Amino acid sequence: MVRGGGKLWSILVEVGPTTGDSPAIGIRWGIFSQFGVSWDNWGNNGRSLVDALFGLGEDGQLLTINCYMIEDHNDRRQFATATQRNREPILQVLSRVLPPKGTVLEVASGTGEHGAFLAPRLSPRFWLPSDPNPLAIESIESWRRYTGSDRLLEPLCLDVREPQWTVERTPPPQLQEQPIGALVCINMIHISPWEACLGLVAGAQRLLPVGGVLYLYGPYKEGGRHTSPSNEGFDLMLRDRDPSWGIRDQEAVIAAAEERGLRFQEMLEMPANNRSLVFGK
Ligand SMILES: C[S@@+](CC[C@H](N)C(=O)[O-])C[C@H]1O[C@@H](n2cnc3c(N)ncnc32)[C@H](O)[C@@H]1O
């Protein structure tokens, strides 16, 4: 782990062919401050950017060193290590709490790995991923093609802070037969301004039918206190990155949701001091 000038840095290393069809092996490396990418963008593969964008780590890790073999330069899939740890427990919760059919709209999909894993396993439901970041959209779409699941729909560009979401302005045709019955948001509320949380619950109020479900995953404070030392360190790191970010009070999130007509149903402890919050409409 490295800290430099009060900023967080990541060192990323990629190993792979120097061009898509050359047998030569090359190494590229970049040093990133989180979200401030300084990268030579060698080749056509943005895979390492995931760690610049998402490498904050749920358990407060400060630095990631990743090595990837680049097999296909058109493959834009990005990888977030936490997904390996949390996707199965998230599946267990979602299998139980989601409506039995319809479309699950995922906001802040990031790499798109959750949808790739969950969509085929939550069939017959459909999974509609989204994110406002164009790099994320590329990764989500790449994961969609890689997975080949007919339950995983094309990603939408969607910013929850907008008063009317893209999915409302131009709904994908599939929603006519498979309307949205649930909203899923994993690891966004603490890595975005509070307005994103407010936008999310406002959107849930507009989009969810009666009986619909809002599912949130991430770290929370309770009674104004962190639930673990690692969450406290993570929170400091987030605020250092951007003062408008930070681990939220669970009570504040529940109050914001209830102001928008959503009923808090349950909280479940999840891996690495994260929690699932489930709301019904
Ligand atoms: C830490 S990543 C989480 C990605 C993924 N859900 C996961 O758990 O791996 C946070 C994501 O929130 C997205 N995000 C930030 N602000 C947002 C907003 N206003 N609306 C929708 N997504 C947002 C970012 O683009 C990013 O993909």
Image (cartoon, rainbow, N blue to C red):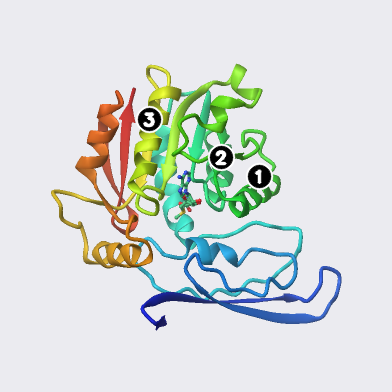
SS type, badge 2: loop
Crowd tier of the residue under label 3, counting other residues whose Cα lies within 10 Å: few below 14, some 14–19, many 20 or above: many
Q: Are marks 1 and 3 in contact (CB under 8 Å)?
A: no
Identify the residue position indicated by label 1 in the image: 144
Name the mark nearer the viewer: 2 or 3. Answer: 3
Q: Is residue 58 left or right of residue 23?
A: left
- Identify the residue shown where x is 62% and y is 37%: 152
The percent position of residue 74, horizontal first and vertical second, equals: 76, 58
Q: Amino acid at mark 2?
A: Pro
- Residue 276 is drawn in which quadrant? top left
Tell which of 158 and 24 is nearer to you: 158
Q: Nearer the viewer, residue 35 or 146?
A: 35
In front of the other: label 2 or label 1? Answer: 2
Q: Mark 2: few, some, or many residues within 10 Å (few <14, many ≥20)?
A: many
Q: Residue at x 66, y 46 (%)?
A: 141
Secondary structure under the numbered disc 1 in the rendered image: helix
x then y, percent, for residue 107: 48, 40
Lower position in the chain sequence, tag 1 or tag 3 = 1
Q: Which-is-in-front pick, marks 1 and 3?
A: 3
C-alpha separation, residue under disc 2 versus residue under disc 1: 10 Å
**Which disc, if any, is residue 129?**
2
Q: Secondary structure at mark 3?
A: helix
- Residue reaching furthest to the left: 223
Q: Which residue is mark 3?
A: 202
Q: Position of residue 251 (x, y in %)?
A: 20, 41
Mark closest to the chain's N terminus, 2 or 3: 2
Q: Are marks 2 and 1 in contact (CB under 8 Å)?
A: yes
- Indicate the amino acid at tag 1: Arg
124 or 83, which lies in front? 83
